[in-house]
Amino acid sequence: MEMTESQIKEIVDKVIAKVTLDAPAGSMHGVFADMNVAIEKAKEAQRIVRVMSMDQREKIISVIRRKIKENAETLARMGVEETGMGNVGDKILKHLLVAEKTPGTEDIKTTAWSGDRGLTLVEMGPFGVIGAITPCTNPSETVLCNSMGMIAGGNTVVFNPHPQAVKTSQFAINLVNEASLEAGGPDNVAVTVEKPTLDSSAVMMKHKDIPLLVATGGPGVVTAVLSSGKRGIGAGAGNPPALVDETADIRKAAQDIVNGCTFDNNLPCIAEKEVVAVDKIFDELLNYMVKEQGCYLASKDVQDKLVKTVINEKGALNRKCVGRSAKVLLKMVGVEVPDNIRCIVFEGPKEHPLISTELMMPILGLVRARDFKDAVEKAVWLEHGNRHSAHIHSKNVDRITEYARAIDTAILVKNGPSYAALGFGGEGFPTFTIASRTGEGLTSAATFTKRRRCTMSDSLCIR
């Protein structure tokens, strides 16, 4: 049987991803054996980047965008192959989103005041060399998105990637440096080490030439960065609830929630992790999910098996389950389902471990609430004060406002899937570093700059 062009391309892309994963780290730009050497190289590059014009920086970012598009499928396949998490199709979409919508130098703006007393300018200046810790859930997406914003601000960056995704992260770093060189910029605008460890992370966090630290990951790494004594931007955990009341378009809510929950197998930290629905429409919502949206309704026995499988005895997630598909998770507990099953649903109390824990897998527990007030209280409890993300499906503006004030998150999506918050089917720009804990929210180039006020006063003013 003859193969189609698309089938041949898929095989080629798989081979390229595999060969790239097997390539030695030393053959890539920006990858060094020692963290201190990496920092010194980034410092040398920053001396050049900081005096580059905005146009020159934007040229680098434009080439990065092009290279992301050219390598989107390779990056996606590498991420799935190396980590076992997520799926290729959705990861391609995430890389294209980064390429097309991540803000560049247009995010760096000068504010000015002028009048009888003179002229005052507030400019955004670079921090210098930024130290960044990145996760295994979005390894190349975070590296590329951060690099674009940090370079736009006149910085260079030292990454300490998650060891589980080191090859994918290094490939992304190499792309950034190739883009800089192609655009006439310096090498080593983004750097890392061959074998990132806790020790290399500690060196980076304590280094005198790193004034700003950016952590994207779990609560442990964010706490470490915020305890470093340096300026820190922390993008940590979330457990985003989706509230549905009786005024919502219930069929659309079911579709939006499942689409958001299952995107890249629930790896995005903003994704719907559980649902709180008022009693009046609870059964209708669950019915649409099962009958129309490819959801598997788990029995009490299956729920219990899932708890023991995805959460270990210490209460931590089983890494072999994170980012896996619903079909794979169900197979782990002895349940075979067709390919169209994309989410596991069940009804349970808010304290259920599969509901109260941020799972990062397509398991969606539904909590029944007496009324809207009860639903808000349950959703706020489930968000655990992370102030990260939340979602609501309602046509009542007053209720949406009440929920927004009560849950007080960096992101609130109204009547849409979670990924709309990142500009995917919604307005706005994407980021893979959402700093809810330290208050910056969705980070961009402006986040990675410091403000400088320059005042020229007219001392000869006649009174």
Image (spheres, rainbow, N blue to C red):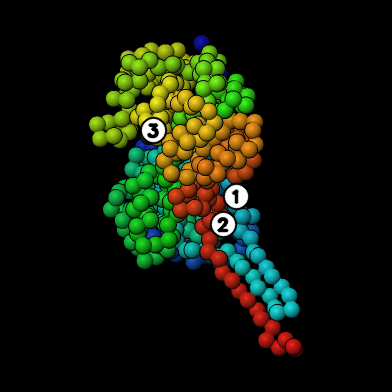
Instruction: Name the mark nearer the viewer: 3 or 1.
Output: 3
Q: Residue at x 49, y 63 (%)?
A: 127
Which amino acid does the dot numbered 2 rest on?
Answer: Ala
Where residue 448 appears, as percent x and y from the top left, is 51, 57
Element under disc 3 = helix
Label 1 CA crowd tier, 10 Å (few <14, some 14–19, many 20+): many
Q: Is residue 180 above or below residue 207?
A: above
Where residue 130 appears, as percent x and y from the top left, is 44, 58
State if disc 1 and disc 2 touch (CB < 8 Å).
Answer: yes
Where residue 244 appears, as percent x and y from the top left, is 55, 28
The residue where tag 2 is placed is 446
Where residue 331 appears, as percent x and y from the top left, is 35, 17
The residue where tag 1 is placed is 103
Q: In the image, 77: left or right of 101?
A: left
Instruction: Indicate which disc residue 36 carries.
Output: none
Q: Is residue 172 visible?
A: no
| CA separation in Å, label 2 and label 3 | 34 Å
Element under disc 2 = helix
Tell which circle, 3 or 1, labels the residue nearer the N-terminal end.
Answer: 1
Q: Residue at x 34, y 53 (%)?
A: 224
Q: Is residue 94 above or below residue 280?
A: below
The residue where tag 3 is placed is 356
Q: Residue at x 56, y 33 (%)?
A: 392
Element under disc 1 = loop
Q: Is residue 54 above or below residue 243?
A: below
Tell which circle, 2 or 3, labels the residue nearer the N-terminal end.
Answer: 3
Instruction: Name the mark nearer the viewer: 2 or 1.
Output: 2
Seen from this angle, which residue lies furthest top? Answer: 1
Which amino acid does the dot numbered 1 rest on?
Answer: Pro
Q: Quadrant of the C terminus?
A: bottom right
| CA separation in Å, label 3 and label 1 | 34 Å
